[in-house]
Image: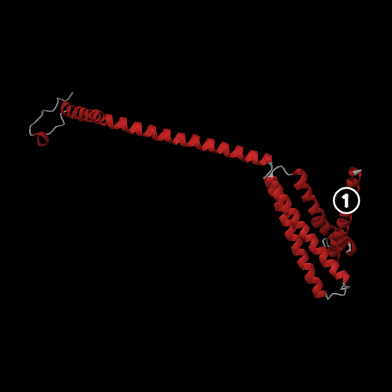
């Protein structure tokens, strides 16, 4: 008996929700039908179709968008970050639906359809700015929602891990290069005197060979060495 009563209450509540959503959707559609500047060029689709498309566009962004984000929050979100993004997006869309529905209800309830052209243009311009802002926020929310999925977070963490390993490898390579450089410098310092001696010996030996060659060819003059060297006989 208790279960049947709960079922009945659930059915009544569901019917009430459907009614509220329907009324809100109608009011949102009516607001954008009346005040949103033509969504598509009138020359292309005609004025009536353009106004219908404007109403459907507002309905899609606000009412349906709010319910879709709520469903995403409840059923699709994988973690707290995604749930937070979804509930905020649902709230923004719901607020837009609430404001437009309330405004349209007040206007129709007070029979203020005979608005001046300036006031109509102002309302239309404001509604255009609002729907553009909500569209941008929804796009940003979708981007953030995907970015914060479990798969994306895992990929990001794996990418950061690979980068850390790469940085550690490069750091070790730099340390090794510095160690090799220091060892080369140390060994060179230890051998530099021996190397310098070898270079000096080689240089001196080369000079000696040059001088001996000059003597053997008879090119050393008396002015250069203080004595006379006979020239070799001509062949």
Which residue is at a point 80% across and 68% down the rendered structure image?
A: 124
In screen coordinates, is 200 left or right of 21? left
Q: Nearer the viewer, residue 111 or 116?
A: 111
Residue on which the image places disc 1? 14
Across and down, in percent, residue 215 comes to 15, 28
Label tally: 1
Quarter of the figure with the C terminus: top left
In terms of depth relative to the viewer, which is nearer, 170 or 149?
149
Q: At which x and y percent is residue 85?
A: 70, 50
Query: Compared to 182, does 36 lie above or below?
Result: below
**Above or below, comparing residue 76 to residue 50 in the picture:** above
User: Can residue 88 be seen in the rendering of this structure?
Assistant: yes
| Residue 35 visible to an observer of this rendering | no
Residue 158 versus residue 8 in the image, above or below: above
Q: How is the image coloured?
A: secondary structure
Up-down relation of residue 116 to residue 63 (above or below): below
């Amino acid at each position: 008996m208790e279960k049947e009563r709960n079922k009945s209450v659930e059915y009544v509540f569901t019917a009430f929700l459907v009614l509220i959503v329907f009324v809100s959707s109608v009011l949102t559609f009516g607001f954008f039908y009346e005040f949103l500047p033509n969504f598509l060029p009138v020359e292309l689709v005609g004025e009536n179709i353009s106004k219908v498309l404007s109403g459907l566009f507002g309905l899609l962004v606000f009412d349906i968008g709010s319910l879709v984000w709520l469903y995403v929050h409840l059923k699709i979100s994988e973690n707290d970050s995604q749930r937070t993004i979804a509930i905020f997006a649902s709230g923004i869309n719901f607020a837009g639906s609430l404001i437009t529905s309330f405004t349209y209800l007040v206007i129709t309830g007070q029979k203020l359809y005979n608005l001046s052209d300036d006031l109509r243009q102002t309302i239309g311009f404001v509604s255009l700015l609002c729907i553009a802002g909500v569209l941008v926020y929804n796009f940003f929310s979708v981007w953030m929602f995907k970015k914060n999925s479990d798969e994306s977070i895992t990929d990001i963490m794996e990418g950061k891990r690979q980068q850390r390993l790469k940085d550690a490898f490069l750091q070790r390579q730099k340390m090794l290069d510095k160690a090799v450089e220091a060892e080369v410098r140390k060994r060179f310092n230890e051998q530099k005197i021996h190397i310098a001696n070898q270079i000096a010996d080689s240089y001196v030996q080369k000079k000696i060979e040059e001088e001996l060659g000059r003597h053997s060819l008879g090119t050393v003059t008396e002015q250069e060495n203080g004595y006379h060297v006979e020239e070799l006989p001509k062949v």
